[in-house]
Image (cartoon, helix red, strand yellow):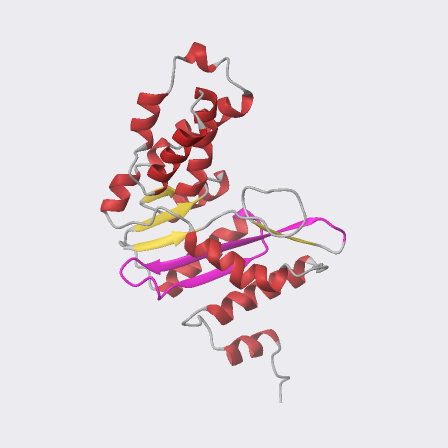
Amino acid sequence: MWVIFTLATTLGRSAQHEDATVTTTERGNGIEVKTAVVYPQEAPTERFRLAEVCTADQWLPMMTGALRVGGVRQHDVLIGVSDGAIWIEEKFKTLGVTKHVLDVFHSAMYVDTVMQALGHPAEQRASMRRTWLRGDVSAQWWLNTSLPSAEQQRQWPPEAIAAVRYLTARVDMMDYPTYRDNGWPIGSGQIEGMNKSVIGSRMKGSGMHWSRPGASRMASLRTFRSNRHAPLALDALRHRAFPSPAQ
């Protein structure tokens, strides 16, 4: 069984994005740096990291290559963890991910928005968040037992209505007690850590600006150096990029 993390976080000064890490160009525009972590469930330290500036369609063959480099075989079970971004969900389906888990920290934020609309006091909301983050609550059970009638929900603020829609559309990704019992991850700590320590620490410095090619190369280099087992020897990579002239 293998675990895949592909998560949306934000770096840089640009507006919040849901689907990738963002750094800043010399013109002040955001650059998406898509990141992933792959590892066998029984050996999380044997993880392979991937980061690239590309489109969602370009990301798919890179992920396929990362799975092959990691040692994934055709009949292996794949567990995917993400923030629920649509493009990630679509690519997980194409990759044959067996179960897509919605990161518990992201889902807890939407649950808190719903609880505010329900009028729950801060102490009660905090208690539920702790229970939710431990993986003690199934989203299907919580939605069935907590939501009022559709007519009452229509009186809620737009953000609460949107939160219910978000949770309802992803309810099959939030059976956290079952995932926890199976030993599957329910949080995004590994890839959040990668985005912060591997990408952000080098590419989010004060006053930094990047071109798209420069950001892509630096992200690739940072993940290459952080991988425990490099997919290609550095000398071979260098000679592929700068082949020696024919003798």
Residue placed most toward the observer, 119 or 135: 119
Q: Quadrant of the N terminus?
A: bottom left
Q: Is residue 41 magenta?
A: yes
Residue placed most toward the observer, 102 or 247: 102
| Picture coordinates of residue 175, whole percent (x, y) | 30, 37
Considering only vertical position in the picture, is 102 above or below 200?
Answer: above
Residue 207 lies in quadrant: bottom right
Q: Residue at x 49, y 22 (%)?
A: 161
Q: Residue at x 30, y 35 (%)?
A: 137
Q: Does residue 142 appear left or right of residue 229 in this picture?
A: left
Considering only vertical position in the picture, is 19 above or below 155?
Answer: below
Residue 177 lies in quadrant: top left
Considering only vertical position in the picture, is 213 above or below 21?
Answer: below
Farthest residue to the bottom: give it: 247
Residue 174 lies in quadrant: top left
Farthest residue to the right: give it: 27
Range drawn in magenta:
27-56
Q: Is residue 89 magenta?
A: no
Q: Does residue 77 appear left or right of residue 148 in this picture?
A: left
Q: Residue at x 45, y 62 (%)?
A: 49
Considering only vertical position in the picture, is 91 above or below 224?
Answer: above
Q: Quadrant of the C terminus?
A: bottom right
Q: Residue at x 59, y 55 (%)?
A: 53
Farthest residue to the left: give it: 181
| Picture coordinates of residue 210, whole percent (x, y) | 69, 59
Farthest residue to the front: give it: 123
Q: Does residue 119 appear left or right of residue 18 in this picture?
A: left
| Picture coordinates of residue 69, whole percent (x, y) | 39, 65
| Picture coordinates of residue 18, whole percent (x, y) | 55, 41
